[in-house]
Amino acid sequence: MADSPVVLLGVTGGIAAYKAAELLRGLQKAGMEVRVIMTNAATQFVTTMTFETLSGFPVRRDAVNELRADSRITHVEDSREADIMVIAPATANTIAKMANGIADNLLTSMCLAFNKTVVVAPAMNTNMWEHPATQHNVAVLRDRGVFVVEPGAGELACGVYGSGRMADPDSIVAEVKLRLQVQRKRDLRGLRVLITAGGTREPIDSVRFIGNRSSGKMGFALARAAFDRGAEVELIEANVDMPAVPGVRQIMTPTAGEMHAEVMKRLANTDILLMAAAVADYRVAEGPAGGKIGKGRDEWSIGLEATTDILCDVAAHHEGQFIVGFAAEYGLEGLDRARAKMEHKQLDMIIFNDISRADIGFDSDFNEVRILTRDSEVLVERAPKETIAEIILDNIAQAVRARRGETMLPA
Ligand SMILES: Cc1cc2nc3c(=O)[nH]c(=O)nc-3n(C[C@H](O)[C@H](O)[C@H](O)COP(=O)(O)O)c2cc1C
């Protein structure tokens, strides 16, 4: 097939390596061309011949400095020719190397050379999966934009029952299909998208501040997804501890005042504004004290004054931009408040999430949201923030298209 998407399938050394053969078949059935790279450890579990026969291509192996038959450097050229990379099963070892940028074999070298979408399906013993080192490494990869297909629970090869079993090949195929669709979706091309992320901090003195628990993960996921869909993206961020988003201009604004100024400066050159940041409503009234205020008093009252409400100011000045607010509310009864906020601030859309739930929202990799417009409400059930970001952008792209009376956004 001339324009079938090309998948680089990395197979690493775990028991689940045999399931990679079924995955390869599934990817082919979904219309993809698959090229396999195996680590040396993987070849102890399954032979290269299995994958060569199934894929119809030679299997690449561990040699770091390898040239192809056409004398080009394998890890660079193969990476360039592929559309997506899938590592399944991904061992704890390979995940750790990826998180640390180690490139000591062909597969991990490719991981660094590859600048498109990467999907990882971890598979390992429960203790290995739950180990803080592995959990940390997986979180690092996620923050960097790698898509992780969570392992499920079940009986493992080591005889115990627990989490760590590789997701079933069908769900990995589904994730790869979704990622390829998104890659090909360029429905925000030519549009300028401004996103705020993180939580502002209002200083009390040189060391203390009034802040909130927002991690910035939702805003970063939106920025990455909007860029992938062809938008020109600027990200105004407050106190986010995450790696840079390639292709996206990032502006640091630690306080509400600075964020307000940067948003207003850019508003006229924006088509879509997404206010995902948690912005402080109050700051210290008399300005932060220099140095560190000492202890030694039984009580301490700090006078606060309201910060400027950015969305209200945007409402007063906007000229046809599509404005999306976020409402982090406690409990489902917050839905009415979210609707009222949409009306009051003249928003085109508001994304409601319930922060009373511990399994979603603040500092979590997951979210569950309701996308509200004046005449619709869409529930997006609990999913990784990357998936939520895609669905939010689907809804925005559709609404912007409808407003412009277009069937297609600019090509
Ligand atoms: C029988 C056996 C089964 C293994 N299964 C797994 C596994 O499922 N997941 C894992 O992370 N490591 C597993 N390991 C350990 C890896 O093979 C080992 O960490 C190896 O260095 C991984 O290399 P690679 O990441 O380059 O493929 C297993 C080892 C043995 C001997």
Image (tube, rainbow, N blue to C red):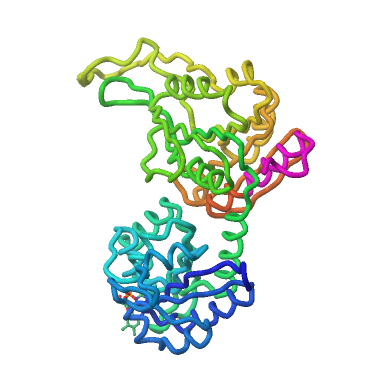
Describe residue 21's horizontal placement relative to residue 12 as left or right.
right
- Residue at the (66%, 47%) spot, across then down: 394
- Quarter of the image where one finds residue 334: top right
> Is any part of residue 127 visible from this angle?
no
Prevailing secondary structure of the magenta residues: helix
Q: Position of residue 356 (x, y in %)?
A: 54, 42
Q: Position of residue 29 (x, y in %)?
A: 63, 77
Q: Nearer the viewer, residue 231 or 12?
A: 231
Q: Is residue 302 above or below residue 90?
A: above
Q: Nearer the viewer, residue 125 or 101?
A: 101
> Is any part of residue 335 visible from this angle?
yes
Q: Is residue 398 magenta?
A: yes
Q: Is residue 105 above or below residue 247?
A: below
| Stretch of the chain drawn in magenta | 391-411
* Quadrant of the frame with the N terminus: bottom right
Q: Position of residue 34 (x, y in %)?
A: 52, 75
Q: Nearer the viewer, residue 242 or 176?
A: 176
Instruction: Please identify the residue farthest to the front as the structure is shown.
Output: 70
Q: Position of residue 125 (x, y in %)?
A: 38, 75
Q: Is residue 51 above or below residue 291?
A: below
Ligand 1 shown in quarter: bottom left
- Quarter of the image where one finds residue 92: bottom left
Q: Is residue 329 magenta?
A: no
- Residue at the (65%, 27%) spot, across then down: 321
Describe residue 143's horizontal placement relative to residue 360 as left or right.
left
- Residue at the (61%, 36%) spot, across then down: 191
- Residue at the (57%, 59%) spot, across then down: 179
Q: Nearer the viewer, residue 371 or 40?
A: 40
